[in-house]
Image (spheres, grey):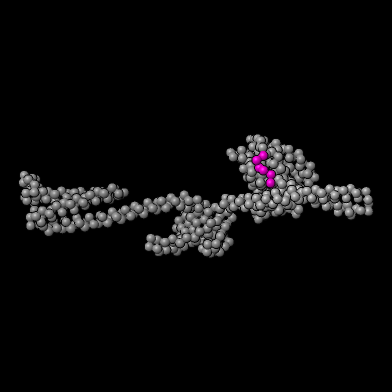
Amino acid sequence: MAILTFGFYWLNTAVWWGVMWLFMQKRKHSTSSSIRAIEGVFSGVALALALAYLMLALHRSALLGVIPSALAHISDIPVVPFVIHLLLLAAGGAALLVLNYRFDHLDREVATVSLHSRYRYMIMADKRAILVFSTDGSLQEINPRGCEWMRDSEHQLIGRPVLQVLERLEPEDAHEMFEQIIKGQVVELKRDDRILGDFEWTELLDEDGHPAGQMLCFSDVTENKKFQREIIQSEKLAVVGQLAAATAHEIRNPLTSIKGFLQLFEHKFKGDQGDTEIREYTRIMVEEVDRMEKIIRDFLLMTKPSDVTRERADVNGVIERLLVLVQNQATLRNINVVTDLGELTPVLMHKEAIQQVLLNLMQNAFEAMNIGGTLTIHTEEDEKYVSSTIQDTGVGMTEEEVANLGSPFYSTKTEGTGLGLTVSSKIIHEHGGILDIRSEKGVGTTITVKLPK
């Protein structure tokens, strides 16, 4: 019985020592001062009980001869009924179990909070718009990019049904748009000068596989679309270049012969009043041959190597020289030419090629206005580019027409070949520049040529 009591005292000592240690550890994780005070009191009580049982254990050890009997007097404490020791042991064991459970729960809470913080950081920093909906379809969370495209604050959007949220993007038919998104169809929306796309609707599941909500993501795909158009344009230019290289020289030779004989016929019948009709037909054929030769020249220009010698030149000087050339044409068409030339840094360029580009754009502007209007030429520079802007007040173009510009043989003009802008685009691309075209039907067109400094 004495040995059993000896082991019982040491067991109580270990249990309450463990309870004290767990209270102290929990106290470190508590944020409330009142809770920390209560946990400090409980850890003190546990420490007192652990020390009391340690003294009882030492006393019992001295009596059994485990330790020197001289230590027995320092651990001589009043004897209490055994049932009280038993109840204290049970209470200590229960405290150990509860505290262990609380620590496990606390670890999971900390892990959950940490995961939620990382999740919040990720969606807030994401360049896409991210909207999280609950299982009943109401908006629970939205990141700053989503608020930007919805043009509203998070406070105003949270709690709204999904269709009301989508109405901020597509007021006319949000339901049809939602159906397309759910089915995974390609949806693209125009917002000002930007394009929204890559819409994704994802069902969210919890760790048990049960529905936890839905997530809608979309992004600004303007640059991707622009890049795709540039790739398609490059492929078109490559095909046209191959075609030009294979056929241009062969076609040019017979055209020269045909033109020579037509001019001979025109000269032969020049003095004969009875052959006026023949002379008129001959003149028309010569003009058509000239037009065909222009197409050939454009083809050949596209096949010329781009590694020409470049020099630093002032874009304003190129424009001023062109204004002298086109002034008569502007006067005949009753077009007012307005210039606003800023101070520019000379840029490295193939001067003749850039002159051809700007001249082509001016001629296009004249033809778009025909009789009457204003041609505005503006130059400026920023940190990266020297920009030349040519703006007309002509008939303008639709978005579809602007998107197709630069494609070989596509032209908004009745007798246009479409090669002029194709060649211009190629020249600017080879200079590492940007050709930006903006137009509105019935208002006019603005084309900006940006050359790197």
453 is within the stretch colored magenta = no
Q: Position of residue 253 (x, y in %)?
A: 78, 48
Question: Which residue corresponds to the image point at 48% horizontal and 51% vertical from the top-left?
Answer: 126
Q: On the rendered structure, is 393 left or right of 66?
A: right
306 is within the stretch colored magenta = yes
Foreground of the two, 447 or 417? 417
Looking at the image, how many numbered discs can be counted on the residues?
Answer: 0
Magenta residues (range): 303-308
Q: Position of residue 348 (x, y in %)?
A: 64, 37
Is residue 371 in sight in this rendering? Answer: no
Foreground of the two, 213 or 1? 1
Quadrant of the snapshot with the N terminus: bottom left
Foreground of the two, 361 or 125? 361
Is residue 132 in sight in this rendering? Answer: yes
Foreground of the two, 28 or 67? 67
Q: On the rendered structure, is 174 left or right of 297?
A: left
